[in-house]
Amino acid sequence: MIDWSRHTNTSLAVHQLHLQGVIAYPTEAVWGLGCDPFSFSAVRKILHLKNRPEHKGVILVACDWQQFAPFTEGLTGAQLGRLHQPNSKPTTWLIPHNGMAPDWIVGGHDTLAVRVTTHPVAACLCRLFGGPIVSTSANPQGLSEATNALKVRGYFGRNIDAITSGTTGSADAPSEIRHLLNGKVMRKG
């Protein structure tokens, strides 16, 4: 098993996160673009690269639920319990926006999209960065998601500050998106 925390490309990616750079990394099903969610310039760069409107918002990933603690303040014990239940597939939860996430992350929504990732590279990035990072598919809007680093480079060239090593996980579709309060599936996974 690879120790991604000791991998040069992982270290470079974490360094770029701290410099407000944009990185690409594998997730459970596709490659993602990421950055520090509190860096407006980095998030804006991702949205520009993807040709994605800001009002759509973006997903945050973390290595564990503790990294989302500021964003889950105000949830009931039952709601937190639902979040913490294991899922058979990657699941992104739409939780009530409690004002802790920047507007450019939630877009025009009253919810925040969060997922605890089980992918070893993505989880390692969050752990070394010390908090959640943006996770949006590495593709311009309207084109298919990148499933390898070569496709990421083809889409974005030198506009990405760092690309990690690694491959996508075994999921055959991007994460399912579920609304925490009503349980509605917003996107099948």
Image: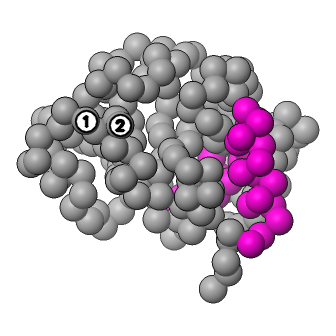
Identified at 68% across, 69% down, the residue is 5
User: With respect to residue 72, does 129 lie above or below?
Assistant: below
User: With respect to residue 69, does 99 lie above or below?
Assistant: above
Q: Nearer the viewer, residue 118 or 124?
A: 124
> What's the mark number on residue 73?
1
Identified at 34% across, 35% down, the residue is 71
Any magenta on residue 21? yes
Quarter of image, res 139: top right
Q: Nearer the viewer, residue 60 or 187?
A: 60
Q: Residues within 10 Å of mark 2 (few under 14, many from 20)?
A: few
User: With respect to residue 25, does 94 lie above or below?
Assistant: above
Question: Are the two marked residues, 1 and 2, in contact with CB atoms closer than 8 angstroms?
Answer: yes
User: With respect to residue 76, does 112 lie above or below?
Assistant: above
Q: Secondary structure at mark 2?
A: helix
Label 1 – label 2 distance at C-alpha = 6 Å
Residue that label 2 marks: 70
Q: Secondary structure at mark 1?
A: loop
